[in-house]
Image (cartoon, helix red, strand yellow):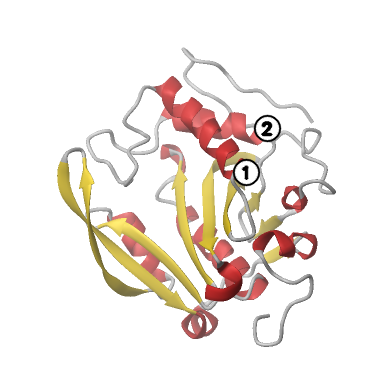
Amino acid sequence: MTFWCRGAGRQEYSVARAGHNDRMNPEWWPLAQLRLETPRLELRSPTESDLCALAGLAALGVHDPEVQPFAVPWTDASPAERARSTLQYQWRQRGQWTPERWALDLVVVRDEVVVGTQSISAENFAVLREVSTGSWLGLRHQGQGVGTEMRAAVLYLAFAGLGADYALSGAFSDNPASLAVSRKLGYAEDGIKRELRRGKPAVTQRWRLDRATWHATARLPVAIHGLESCRPMFGLPAEPEAGHE
């Protein structure tokens, strides 16, 4: 299949699915074949075609410009700058990957359309068994339960696939959509952090989900594909250890 991505000056930047012709050889980059499936979504390591679509979404807008939900204000920029910074961020995450410090950024696809991105990251995961998550959706795809479903998918990867003990998240106290997702998925409040936002102080609410709570509350069916060969990239042995499966 082919893809297309409209340039600046158009109403839409597009999103049609591109198949896998531009996917990296998994022999060199095993993460290229990592994929999660839920009832409505596919989360996958992005191809260059996927990144083009993701950059287009960023250019169209991610939130009301009157508010700023991100600690790093990457959206306070022109459409072209938002698109470019999206690409640079994604490339940088791959280039800086080590088993001791990694950030997996997956594109979220619904009905063959890239609708956003979901990340899961960690430092010294093999010892600490703790991950953090982050995400964003294009404006037109918000308010449909997609944010909850994509977070639930990477939580399944973290706990069932990688053997995490904890998952962390955070959101400004005036970001009700993100806070609602954390509550819905069983997180407990984990303190606050004061940060600078557009030159003024803002409060970030931190959240923590432990393995036992996740196991008792997880309901979404998730299928993981292509994880086995990726395990060393996450700092893990090739075979799952007892107690962390």
Residue beneath disc 1:
94
Where is residue 164? Give x, y as percent.
57, 74
Residue beneath the point at 44% across and 71% down: 185
Q: Is residue 27 above or below residue 198?
A: below
Residue beneath disc 2:
48
Q: 10 Å neighbourhood of mark 1: few (<14), some, or many (≥20)?
A: some
Query: Position of 213 compared to 70: left or right?
Result: right
Where is residue 151? Give x, y as percent.
50, 60
Query: Position of 148 compared to 27: left or right?
Result: left
Q: Is residue 79 above or below residue 219?
A: above
Residue beneath the point at 53% across and 53% down: 119
Query: Position of 40 compared to 229: left or right?
Result: left
- Determine which quarter of the picture holds residue 191: bottom left
Viewer-side residue, 119 vs 195: 195
Check contact, mark 1 vs mark 2: CB within 8 A.
no
Residue beneath the point at 38% across and 66% down: 182
Instruction: Look at the numbered disc 1 and give the secondary structure of its residue.
Output: helix
Residue beneath the point at 55% across and 66% down: 124
Give the amino acid at mark 2. Glu
Q: 10 Å neighbourhood of mark 2: few (<14), some, or many (≥20)?
A: some
Instruction: Give the Cα distance between marks 1 and 2.
Output: 13 Å
Q: Is residue 183 visible?
A: no
Give the amino acid at mark 1. Arg
